Amino acid sequence: MRPILMKGHERPLTFLKYNRDGDLLFSCAKDHTPTVWFADNGERIGTYRGHNGAVWSCDVSRDSMRLITGSADQTVKLWNVQTGAQLYTFNFGSPARAVWGPLNRTIVSAGEDAVIRIWDSETGKLLREADKESGHKKTITSLTKSADCSHFLTGSLDKSSKLWDTRTLTLIKTYVTERPVNAVAMSPLLDHVRSTVLSYVYMVCATLRHSIPKSIVYCQVREAKRSLLDFFYTELGKLEQKRLSALLNEDPAIMECRSALVKRLELYRSAQAEIDTVAWSK
């Protein structure tokens, strides 16, 4: 597939975000100016001017009518997506990244002080702070949420990524890496899989109980998809593709595409330059 080159920012990119429908792409950069593009052809629609520092993150509402942006100027700004008008400014006191909470009633923020906070989106009042003992120990570099806003993911210079419950700010899981985490992204398929993954676990474990490690049988629901995909598409190899496609009722051609994707991901992993931002397409 031929990539689309989008030219418009004057300084390095810091964050990318698709809207819910996948037809708009929002980009943030160190040039202080968030930008919106048509996702299908890369045409620039417009910009949002008002920040006085690098813009680290953005998030668009479910109806694609409102946009929030977090910046190094210690503010989070609320925008009208269509007109580019600035609607409100939240002053957070430190460089911030922000995403919408459930029903757009709250804003989740994180930044250089490594503290995660939840704010009222109407009044700007601080509602809750995450426990510092279970939180990150260094600057939070990335913040993203699940499609249903029930969970969010943070990445940090402390070489870890953490999954949180949005409503309670409870830490669910910590992922430890060997290097500082520059960017995190949650697959849009996660919510769909959540409702069907249990049946997959029991079906596969019953059929392949002699070849699948017992630990997979007892894995948590939120880990099942990742564990199964790792096992299916990287360990069994090409000889098991037809068998697995029958079990999952999946076209063999799709299995071939998945194998090609694994090879492509290996190329991405071997990239020499640092990757500063990633985003899932819808």
Image: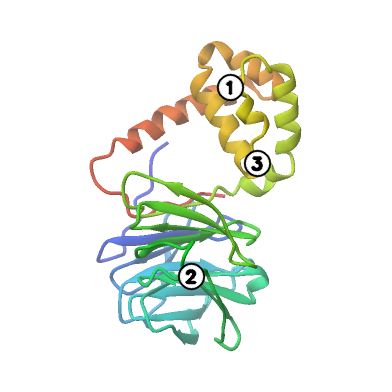
Say what secondary structure mark 3 lies in: loop
Q: CA distance from mark 3 to mark 2?
A: 25 Å
Front-most of residues 128 and 124: 128
Q: Is residue 21 visible?
A: yes
* Residue type at tag 1: Ala
Mark closer to the observer (1, 2): 2
Q: In this figure, which residue is indicated by the disc labeled 2?
A: 116
Front-most of residues 137 and 50: 137
Residue, x 67% and y 25% (percent of image)? 250
User: As displayed, is residue 77 above or below residue 178?
Assistant: below
Report the colour scheme: rainbow
Q: Picture coordinates of residue 169 (x, y %)?
A: 58, 66
Mark 3 or mark 2: which comes first in sequence? 2
User: As displayed, is residue 119 above or below residue 173?
Assistant: below
Q: Quadrant of the N terminus?
A: top left
Q: Is residue 257 visible?
A: no
Q: Are there few (<14), some (14-19), or many (20+) residues within 10 Å of tag 3?
A: few
Q: CA distance from mark 1 to mark 3?
A: 30 Å
Q: In this figure, which residue is indicated by the disc labeled 1?
A: 253
* Residue type at tag 2: Ile
| Residue with the most extreme top position | 239
User: As displayed, is residue 158 above or below residue 87?
Assistant: above
User: As displayed, is residue 135 above or below residue 202?
Assistant: below
Q: In this figure, which residue is indicated by the disc labeled 3?
A: 220
Residue, x 63% and y 62% (percent of image)? 149
Q: Are there few (<14), some (14-19), or many (20+) residues within 10 Å of tag 1?
A: few
